[in-house]
């Protein structure tokens, strides 16, 4: 049985965090308000962790990703600490790798650990030089203030255009031993993952090998984060890290079986919850869109079709306007890279206010526009697509497209 718990990145045993404002983002017009917004965080484990990661497939990669990947290769998938900053992506800079390595070195020296045991992540504006001086000043405080209850300080430190923090955690049992998986994420725009999305950090006290941790992460990314799209832009700094320190005390999971499946289910719960949070907090968004594709011959086809629907700018606009323009759903299905029989396709629009069929066997059916409008008033809209060709299903998540999305991104850099 899986149980939701509090604590985010600190929910699992042995994980501490801290976060503060160090000045990476300069106050605008001398506004003191910015000093209440953390821009750097650190989280650590009391014990060396098995660690797995997935990275953006964008050919332009942020320097922190390159350094993190190199460090994990050197340690054989082990880590102890992660330092992350917001407001500056440290991407497309000549000194980017040097600065990312320096961040790891600063933490390692302060904690007296091997520098390769420290991983690094950054998010924010691309192409601006990352100032290292405020980070150098902040690291001693970050280490000194590490605490088992400071998940909130860390979760807020990685926010950019996010309007809410994103945390999730669950407990589950393996052979009578209680284990925990918890995590935090950031992301609101430039989200169309091709491996993972934004910055996502997950911790666990379950004992599991690095190899199986990587397999579980890669499998679940495919059906969670990779099924998310806000605006069709795949970020240069996308990364998901999972760290497991084994402090729960279960026998280490080294092969696939019941114990591995239990861990994988818990990891899915956390990653799926964070995925929905990311979709709902899309830049300028007023509505979460969830497309469920049923009756598919295989999962990959279902993902392709569901994601095509949530990626459709025309459909996203219709949802913003609360217009039951179901033809845009069929249009999006039609240009998806998948083969199917349109004459078998049914479509429903659903929310907590009800469910209404708008298309059957590839053709429109009569429905009440008033009833549809009532359903679309919700801030969470579900689109059910039935291909009626098989037994598989898949889900994708997105959000509506609003005026505010353009406003936010029109002057994001300045």
Image (cartoon, helix red, strand yellow):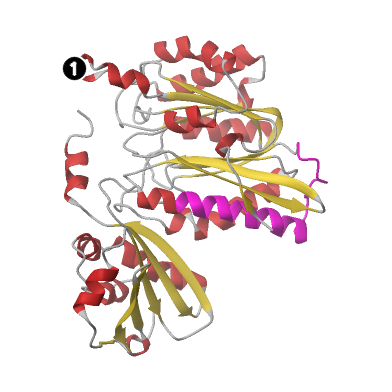
The image shows residue 325 at horizontal and vertical percentages of 20, 73
**Residue 192 shows in the view:** no
Q: Which residue is mark 1?
A: 29
Q: Is residue 169 left or right of residue 278?
A: right
**Residue 171 shows in the view:** yes
Q: What residue is drawn where x is 18% and y is 62%?
A: 321
Residue 303 in magenta stretch:
no
Circle 1 SS class: helix
Helix, strand or loop: magenta stretch: helix
Estimate how packed mark 1 is, as few (under 14), some (14 to 19) or many (20 or more) residues with alpha carbons within 10 Å.
few
Q: Is residue 191 left or right of residue 136?
A: left
* Quadrant for the N terminus in the image: bottom right
Residue 249 in magenta stretch:
yes
Span shown in magenta: 247-275
Q: What residue is drawn where x is 32% and y is 45%?
A: 190
Examine the image and state in which quarter residue 315 appears. Answer: bottom left
In the depicted structure, whether residue 36 falls above or below residue 267: above
In the depicted structure, whether residue 379 falls above or below residue 83: below
Q: Is residue 337 left or right of residue 207?
A: left
Name the residue nearer the viewer: 94 or 139: 139
Name the residue nearer the viewer: 298 or 406: 406
């Amino acid at each position: 049985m899986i149980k939701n718990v509090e604590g985010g990145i600190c929910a699992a045993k042995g994980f501490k965090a801290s976060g503060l404002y160090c000045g990476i983002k300069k106050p605008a017009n001398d506004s003191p308000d910015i000093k209440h917004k953390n821009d750097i965080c650190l989280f650590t484990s009391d014990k060396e962790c098995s660690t797995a990661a997935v990275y953006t497939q964008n050919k332009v990669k942020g320097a922190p990703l390159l350094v993190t990947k190199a460090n994990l290769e050197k340690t054989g998938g082990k880590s102890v600490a992660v330092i992350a900053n917001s407001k500056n992506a440290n991407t497309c800079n000549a000194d980017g790798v040097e600065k990312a390595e320096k961040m790891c070195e600063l933490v390692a020296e302060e904690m007296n650990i091997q520098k390769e045991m420290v991983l690094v992540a950054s998010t924010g504006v691309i192409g601006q030089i990352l100032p290292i001086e405020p980070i150098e000043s902040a690291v001693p405080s970050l280490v000194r203030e590490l605490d088992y209850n400071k998940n909130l300080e860390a979760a807020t430190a990685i926010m950019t255009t996010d309007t809410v923090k994103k945390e999730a955690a669950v407990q589950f049992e393996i052979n009578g031993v209680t284990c925990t998986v918890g995590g935090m994420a950031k992301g609101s725009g430039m989200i169309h993952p091709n491996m993972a999305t934004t910055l996502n950090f997950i911790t666990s006290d379950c004992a599991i090998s690095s190899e199986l941790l990587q397999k579980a992460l890669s499998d679940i990314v495919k059906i969670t984060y990779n099924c998310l799209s806000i605006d069709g832009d795949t970020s240069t700094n996308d990364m998901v890290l999972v760290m497991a320190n084994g402090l729960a005390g279960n026998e280490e999971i080294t092969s696939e079986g019941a114990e591995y499946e239990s861990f994988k289910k818990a990891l899915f719960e956390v990653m799926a919850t964070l995925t929905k949070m990311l979709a709902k907090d899309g830049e300028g968004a007023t509505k979460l869109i969830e497309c469920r594709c049923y009756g598919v011959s295989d999962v990959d086809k279902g993902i392709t079709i569901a994601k095509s629907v949530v990626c459709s700018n025309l459909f996203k606009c219709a949802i913003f306007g609360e217009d039951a323009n179901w033809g845009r759903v069929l249009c999006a299905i039609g240009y998806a890279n998948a083969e199917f029989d349109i004459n078998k396709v049914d479509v429903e629009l659903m929310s907590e206010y009800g469910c209404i069929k708008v298309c059957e066997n590839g053709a429109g059916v009569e429905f009440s526009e008033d009833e549809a409008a009532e359903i679309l008033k919700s801030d969470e809209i579900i689109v059910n697509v039935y291909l009626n060709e098989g037994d598989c299903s898949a889900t994708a998540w997105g959000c509506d497209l609003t005026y505010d999305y353009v406003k936010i991104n029109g002057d994001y850099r300045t």
